[in-house]
Image (cartoon, rainbow, N blue to C red):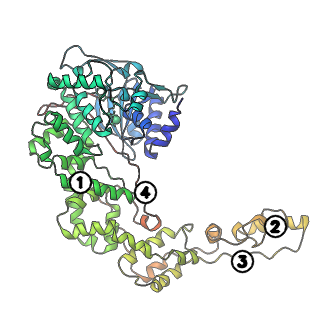
Amino acid sequence: MADYIYTLETRLSPDQQKGVTLVLDAAKAAGMNLYLTGGAIRDIITGFPIRDLDFTVQGNALKLQKDLERAGAVVGDADNETRTLLLTLPGGVRAEIAMARSERYDKQGKPPQMAPATIIEDLRRRDFTVNAMALSLNEGSRGLLMDPFNGVADIEAKVIRVLHNYAFLEDPSRMIRATRFTTRFHWPLEERTQARYESGKENGYIEYIQSSSIGYEIEQLAYEDDPQGVLKAYEKEGWLKVLNPRWSTAKVDTAGLGALMKTRQQMNELGYTPEVAPAVLYFLTERLGEKDISDLRRAIPRKDLVEAWKDLDSNAHSLAKRLSGKEAGTPSRTWQLLSSARPEMILFLAITARQQAVAQKIKNFFTKWRQVQQKIPLPEMTELRITPQIPAYPKIANDVFLLLLDGKLRSRTETLKFLKPLAPPPPPPPPPPSAKRGRGAKAAAVAAAAVAPPAAASGKPGKGKGKAAAAPATPVPVKSAPAAKPVVPVKPVAAERHVAPVKPAKPAADAKVSQPASAPVVKKPGKPAKTTKPAAKTKAKANSKPKKKGK
Ligand code: ATP
Ligand code: MG
């Protein structure tokens, strides 16, 4: 049997793993059984990126809210009807915790009768077999996969299959979801599912869609990797006008959306992981009227997403203003300002900036200025014992980088002249070799070890068997640094004697520091971080206040 816990641990990002632990702790404290369900299980098995974490608890999920908030979760929505929490966990991890429930559809177009249920019953109310699995996270059954509809086989066959013949009739939003998943995965609908889908389309099931499902599906669009591709598919299938009657692919700012995805990729390669969902919605609806945009916003269940979407313009405007002012008067100050700005804001402004100078500064931040790192004389710094092991290293490296950025260190000679006074003193010479042998030698070695730092001990292994004799043959600057520390303290302040210090920029009021200003100096360009993003769900008939329905 596959070891799903192992797969889970290897496939989740560190932040997602922390998110699982956080939710598990809260569920345990409340005495509720917890399961990972939905897309996360599907994606763990398929190898597709895990976009969000859908949990199901046997019990009232809303009771976990306070505990989760204390642990750093932000609640985007709490749905009383389905007892579902939509959360953003620390690190921007999107999650949903729903109460395990059964659903009974009595009348077309009416919401189902819901009741608390076991996890197995809960799986029966799901949309497709590949989404109807649960992984136990509970002691005693941790790692047990519940797959009553043989979803694993459908994942292997790469097909989307409904659980029963009435799936689309009962909840027509599943037709929209079917289009979304077939577009995303390029998996076809299974034959009978396809026939049901066609018949649902012909018979106008979609008219009976719940308003809460509309909002939920609008929101899901924001998190697609190819939102425009999904939007096109929706248009072709007739679903887009269900989400909003005036929405069409012509309302999309295609160039903006393309630039957004491209710049996001570029930022990922530099180690930033901006959340793009609000900006995706911005560009998808760029040419829609105000009224339609506010209808869409009202329908979306996750309020933190809506707020972030609304704030895009004003935040970008204030960042642009700061980038045009004194605060960004030099490359180093601009660097510090951008390093403390939220990556989302930089990303959005990079695409929408009207002033050439602002756009250029952002461009430099991503490209040209990073190349200045190459000018930091790392071999010479190592020779001077200025290595990452000394506490002053980050500051020294950052100061050099900022001075280089501003052109204040114009040559290698000038850079070395700046660095030399900052070098820590050499380690003390090794103690003279002991003349004694045997027991006496051992005692001497022990005594030497007690007074001399290990790395500064004898250059050659002693003949006795004491610990000091086993110390490194040559004092290695890297390893000896901590030992050398007590002897003469490093004086980073010397830097300020040469050049006026560069004041660290004030973080933006809303800033969430993503990368310290010094990061590029010590870091190699990071691999694109596997991203995790915040998410959401629900629906609303356009123009009407959404009636929420958790999934
Ligand atoms: P992803 O999050 O990758 O888009 P997902 O399958 O996790 O895909 P969500 O919208 O996050 O989709 O929903 C979580 C789970 O809730 C689904 O996997 C499915 O089991 C269930 N679900 C969502 N919408 C419906 C629906 N309309 N009918 C039945 N079950 C649903
Ligand atoms: Mg999901």
Q: Quadrant of the N terminus?
A: top right
Mark 3 vs mark 1: give the one in front. 1
Three-letter code for the amino acid on which mark 2 is drawn: Ala
> Label 1: few (<14), some or many (≥20) within 10 Å?
some
Q: Which mark is residue 258?
A: 1
SS at mark 3?
loop
- Up the image or down, 144 lies above or below 44; here it is above
Query: Where in the figure is residue 102, as x and y percent of width and height?
Result: 33, 18
Q: Is residue 329 left or right of residue 7?
A: left
**Of helix, strand and loop, which one carries label 2?**
helix
Q: State the residue position of label 4.
A: 527
Tell me which label, 1 or 4, sits earlier in the chain.
Answer: 1
Q: For mark 3, what is the residue?
A: 429
Disc 1 secondary structure class:
helix
Task: Give amino acid for label 4.
Answer: Lys
For disc 2, the neighbor class at 10 Å (few under 14, some 14 to 19, many from 20) is many
Disc 4 and disc 2: Cα gap in Å? 47 Å
Q: Position of residue 524 (x, y in %)?
A: 46, 64
Rendering quarter of residue 127: top left
